[in-house]
Each structure stands twice: as C-alpha cells, then as structure tokens.
Amino acid sequence: MTPPSDITIEVVDDDKDLRNTLVMVLRAQGFKVRAHHSGTAYLSAERSMGLRLMLLDVRMPFMSGLKLHAEIRRTGDLVPVIFMSGESFPHEVSDDPEPDAVAFLEKPFRTQQLMQAIDLAVQSFKA
C-alpha cells in the first residue's frame, strides 16, 4: 500500500469551510494536501509532482467541476478524480463526456466514506 505521505490530494471546492475541513482531516491522515477555491485557481497553480488525486466539487461558479475535469483530461492529465457534490447526482457525473471518476461523494459525507473513495483512487495508481 502506498503510504499517505507519498500522495498529494488536490482539493478543489468553492466552499471555504468544507475545503478547510477536508485539508485538516486529510493532513491528520498523513496526506499532503493542496487546496484550491476554484477550477481556475487549480489551473493557475503549479502542478504538483508525484502521486496525486483530486477531490473535485461538481458545482462551482465560473468553471464547474465537470468543465475542469474535461480541461485537465484535454491536457493529458490523468489524475484520479473523486467528485463531490451536495446538489448533483451520480448520473450527472456519468453524463460527463469522459466519465472516468473514481467515485462520487454526496455531501455531506462521513470521513469513512471519504477514506474508502481515496483507497479506490490509490488502487488506480497500481493499474
């Protein structure tokens, strides 16, 4: 199993409180975490190196999570993505032209659900 300290989790969510909570929980689990308040902020940031995965909010202003997902795939970035939303449903994500998300978390979700989704993403590193 890949140690959490070898993995960077990119959190992209416009909800500041949730973003901060996710950062705190994930760091407590031993992960490196980078938080972004929007899709544009993520795209503007320097790309992290090494193993990484993304927690991506589906509905955000200006650039939705689905649009960001399409853009990062267009550039050849194959980072494993876990979609999250309190207002969307899994079938909306499956309507994405490139439905390769590792998991869909409906907000609010429990830490155990989050960690199970992350475990799935980590397994994709070995594929």
Image: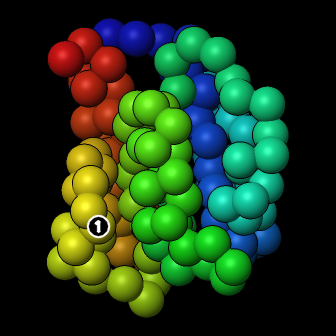
- Residue 117 located left or right of residue 5: left
Q: Quadrant of the N terminus?
A: top left
Residue farthest along the front direction in this orientation: 74
Q: Residue at x 69, y 24 (%)?
A: 48
Question: Foreground: 74 or 105?
Answer: 74
Q: Residue at x 58, y 36 (%)?
A: 9
Question: Foreground: 16 or 36?
Answer: 36
Residue denoted by label 1: 96
Question: Foreground: 1 or 87?
Answer: 87
In the rendered image, residue 115, in percent from the top left (x then y), is placed at 39, 43
Considering only vertical position in the picture, is 18 above or below 69? below
Please rate how many residues cluster around mark 1, counting C-alpha atoms within 10 Å: few if below 14, some from 14 to 19, many from 20.
some
- Residue 127 located left or right of residue 34: left
- Would residue 118 be visible to someone looking at this image? yes
In the rendered image, residue 91, in percent from the top left (x then y), is placed at 19, 77
Q: Quadrant of the C terminus?
A: top left
Quadrant assignment, res 61: bottom right
In the rendered image, residue 124, in percent from the top left (x then y), is placed at 26, 26
Residue farthest along the bottom direction in this orientation: 87
Q: Amino acid at mark 1?
A: Asp
